[in-house]
Image (tube, rainbow, N blue to C red):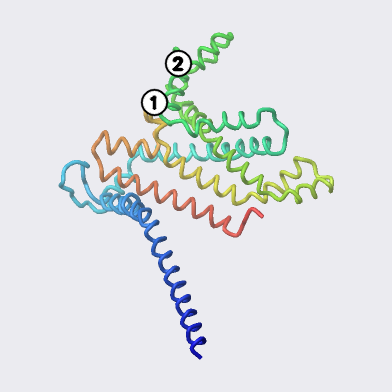
Amino acid sequence: MLGRQTDGNQKKKKRSTGKNAVLGNTKMAYIYILPVFIFLGVFTYYAMAFNIGISFDSWNGVSPEKIFVGLDNYMKLMKDPYFHLALKNTTVYFLITIPVQAVLGFLLANCFVNTKVRAKGLIRSIIFFPNVVALVVIGTAFNQMYNFQQGFLNETLRAIGLGKLALDWTGNPKIALYSIIIANIYTYVGFSMTLYITGLLSVPKDVMEAAKIDGASGVQSTRYIALPLLKSTHTTVIILGIVGTLKTFDIVWLITQGGPARKTEMLTTMLYRSYILEYKAGYAAAIAVVILIIALVLSCINLYFQRKDTDY
């Protein structure tokens, strides 16, 4: 009888010990993730709420005095011709940049995964290299390369007898925006390539082998099997492209500073100009809210069409 009671007590102790261990692990887990929540709360959600709040104020960003103006900043923004120009440039920017980056990234990834290429790792590293270099370096390099008088591009054209093709790549309003787009594609195509390489490597080999046995060519296998199975990868590339494009500032500012005559003005450069150069903190905050809304809307639309799709 005494032995049974002892066994029962031991079992109860084990259960209580197990529960305490679980509770202890749970507490430790919350302690570990607490800094993340604090960081997000302070530097993301509080900053976002603060920005939305000052978008309804007239404030120079320095003085403690803020004047509540309601929707006045947004009304001025809608009537500002420079805002319309910046919105147009940003739209053109991502309508060209995102598809080109996605297509080039996929083609490069498919080449590395499905064909035999010498020095594959080295070439991949070279293509991806701009992603680990500071954007200040890349922007400065393209600024120098595009220089009309002594830039590498025009000097090369003159050296090979094609001096007539030398252009003012950043001073000509008709081509300045496209010069920046080229710089952006060069910078980020390696990241798209890496995402697609990961996606292609996740495609089941037996599916591709079965298609090959059935007589499908490499192009057909890529078009009818690989591409449909990479829909979530496409979603990731598009969403990151949208967010990245709407955040583009460094390259544009370092190459053209929004010129000539604001022909390369983006929403981000207009935000910077309004806040830092013109001391219109409330107006700049309204621009930031518009950028946030555009990013959320475009991302939600993309997710809506892709929500039921998975890689396989």
Residue depicted at x 27% and y 39%: 275
Query: Disc 1 marks which residue?
Result: 260
The single residue placed furthest to the front in the displayed view is: 2
- Give the residue type at disc 1: Pro
Residue 276 location, quadrant: top left
- Point out residue 143 in the picture as x, y percentages from the top left corner: 43, 22
The single residue placed furthest to the bottom in the displayed view is: 1
- Marks 1 and 2, the one that precedes in the sequence: 2
Residue depicted at x 75% and y 45%: 221
Foreground residue, 225 or 86?
Answer: 225
Residue depicted at x 54% and y 38%: 191
Q: In the picture shown, does residue 244 fall above or below 129?
A: below
- Point out residue 259 in the picture as x, y percentages from the top left corner: 38, 27
Q: Which mark is residue 58?
A: none
Residue 159 location, quadrant: top right
Query: Disc 2 marks which residue?
Result: 148
Question: Would you call the spot at circle 2 few (<14 residues within 10 Å), some (14-19), or many (20 or more)?
Answer: some
Q: In the picture shown, does residue 262 fall above or below 56?
A: above
